[in-house]
Image: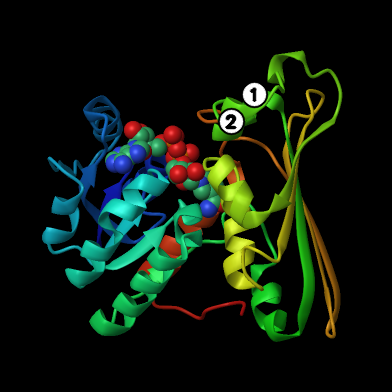
Amino acid sequence: MKRVGLLGCGAIGTQIALAIDSGKIPAELTHVYDASKDSALELVSKLKIKPEIVENSHLLSSHPVNIVVEAASQDAVKDVALSVLQNKRDLMIMSVGALLDESIYDILSDACKDFKKTIYLPSGAIAGLDGIKSIKDELESISITTTKHPRSLKGAKFFEDSDINLDSIVSSTLIFEGTAKEAVSLFPANINVAALLSISGIGSEKTAVKIIADPNTDKNTHHIVATGKFGNMIFSIENFPDSNNPKTSRLAILSAIETLRKYCSDEIQIGT
Ligand SMILES: NC(=O)c1ccc[n+]([C@@H]2O[C@H](COP(=O)([O-])OP(=O)(O)OC[C@H]3O[C@@H](n4cnc5c(N)ncnc54)[C@H](O)[C@@H]3O)[C@@H](O)[C@H]2O)c1
């Protein structure tokens, strides 16, 4: 059985832990950490088999786990990702936006080779990355339009320097238009999907992003259009937000669980 260390005990971390505890993921959750001790304690209280709560995030990979699963924040990735690989553990990252910092991406990519370890990036709240990866060399343009309820966008850095008042929006309104690189720094908790598309495709400066706030929607919708010599790909994903964290889609949680389940299972692997 694979041994798992979990960094982040929020909406995603909790569901991953419950999936391990119920046997859906054939693994042992041995250690957890969250900057909020209360969140870690609350998570552990829900589990039949209790993992140890460690005192800081770096201690997760100093224990003999096979993989550290990050479901915390971009800062957490920047802080611990390299040391996880140096400790010869695999790593699964949910806060993918952190990798759009090219120096971090290059450092982690080199570390994977140096320490012969793998970083897993689940498809998160979108679908179609298998296709995008395959046609990457023939991709000419790619865009993603994300539509969310204004409450799912609250707290984003973008609004610190903007006149837009989310509470006064009464109909579907374009909030942001730019590159994935700009979007990820301005909406760090909302737009990991744009980071994933960039990394799978032609990079963050060539991936176009629109963000729409719509007070009349109850879904997080991502509409992706890719064109090139291969033909065209159009994906529309309508996600229900998670009940514990409206910024996170249910699909993102299920995708994290499936990625870890696959990592922990010996079986036929489906898809590109
Ligand atoms: N890849 C995707 O498609 C996708 C989709 C949704 C969310 N996410 C990202 O996954 C991460 C987790 O999402 P969530 O919905 O579980 O969030 P959440 O807010 O419900 O939980 C995050 C938890 O991590 C803890 N945390 C934050 N920074 C930390 C740090 N530096 N060290 C230790 N603990 C820290 C918080 O205290 C919190 O308990 C977020 O960064 C989110 O943006 C990615």
Q: Is residue 230 above or below residue 67?
A: below
Residue furthest out toward the top: 168
* Quadrant (top left/top right/bottom left/bottom right) for the C terminus: bottom right
**Exactly how many numbered labels are in the figure?**
2
Q: Secondary structure at mark 2?
A: loop
Residue 233 on image: x %, y % = 83, 70
Q: Nearer the viewer, residue 49 or 152?
A: 152
Task: Characterize the local packing of mark 1: few (<14), some (14-19) or many (20 or more) Cα atoms within 10 angstroms.
Answer: some
Callout 1, which amino acid? Arg
Q: Where on the picture, by quarter, is residue 124?
A: bottom right
Ligand 1 quadrant?
top left
Image point 69% across, 73% down: which residue?
132
| Cβ atoms at labels 1 and 2 below 8 Å apart | yes
Which label lies toward us, 1 or 2?
1
Q: Nearer the viewer, residue 141 or 64?
A: 141
Residue 20 on image: x %, y % = 34, 51
Callout 2, which amino acid? Pro
Q: Is mark 2 within 8 Å of ligand 1?
A: no
Q: In the figure, is residue 230 to the left or right of 266?
A: right
Residue 151: give its label: 1
Question: Does the image show residue 265?
Answer: no
* Quadrant (top left/top right/bottom left/bottom right) for the N terminus: bottom left
Reading the chain from its start, which is encountered first: label 1 or label 2?
1
Q: In the figure, is residue 199 to the left or right of 145?
A: left
Q: Where on the picture, by quarter, is residue 226?
A: bottom right
State how far apart marks 1 and 2 are (Cα): 8 Å
Q: Is residue 52 above or below residue 68?
A: above
Image point 61% across, 28% down: which residue?
161
Where is mark 2, residue-wise? Answer: 246
Residue 149 on image: x %, y % = 72, 28
